[in-house]
Amino acid sequence: MLFAIVATDVANSLEKRLSVRTAHVERLQALKAAGRMVLAGPNPAVESNDPGVAGFTGSLIVAEFESLAAAKAWANADPYVGAGVYASIEIKPFKQVLP
């Protein structure tokens, strides 16, 4: 089943994000390679694809997991969690209708 992982950053998270971004992206690439990734990306803090020093306010990941528990375990093992980037993570089942 698909799950939406919605993470909210702590204030001024940019430096923390950058410190572990490579490891974070590698995990996302592994989901993609396994054919389980629908989409993933950050929420810019301002209306720009490159927010510069404004940074980001969170992330959205939609991917396939065997259960809610598996999605939670995967999300909680993210390098952004260990680095203190995320203030909170919400995970919900997701039904893709379009495209």
Image (cartoon, rainbow, N blue to C red):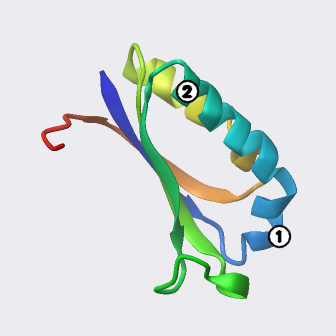
* Residue 67 percent location from the top left of the image: 38, 17
Inter-mark Cα distance, 2 to 1:
25 Å
From where the camera sits, is residue 7 visible?
no
Marker disc for residue 31: 2
Q: Is residue 88 above or below residue 78?
A: below
Residue 42 in picture, x, y percent from top left:
54, 61
**Residue 13, horizontal then vertical, whole percent:** 72, 70
71 vs 64, nearest the viewer: 64
The residue shown at (81%, 62%) is 18
Indicate which disc residue 36 carries: none
Reply above or below: 19 against 98.
below
In the image, is 1 to the left or to the right of 86? left
Question: The C terminus appears in which quarter of the rendering?
Answer: top left
Residue 12 visible in the displayed image: yes
Label 1 SS: helix
In the displayed structure, 40 sits above or below 96; it is below
Residue wearing tag 1: 15
Task: Classify residue 17 as left or right of residue 36.
Answer: right
Q: Which residue is drawn at 72% across and 78% down?
A: 12
Mark 2 / mark 1, whichever is N-terminal: 1
Q: Which residue appears at 55% of the width and 27% of the height?
A: 31
As drawn, 45 above or below 24:
below
* Location of residue 56 by image quarter: bottom right
Q: Where is residue 49 in the image (x, y as percent from the top left)?
A: 53, 76
Q: Which amino acid does label 2 sit on?
A: Leu
| Mark 2 neighbour density, 10 Å: few (under 14) some (14–19) many (20 or more) | some
Q: Residue at x 54, y 80 (%)?
A: 45
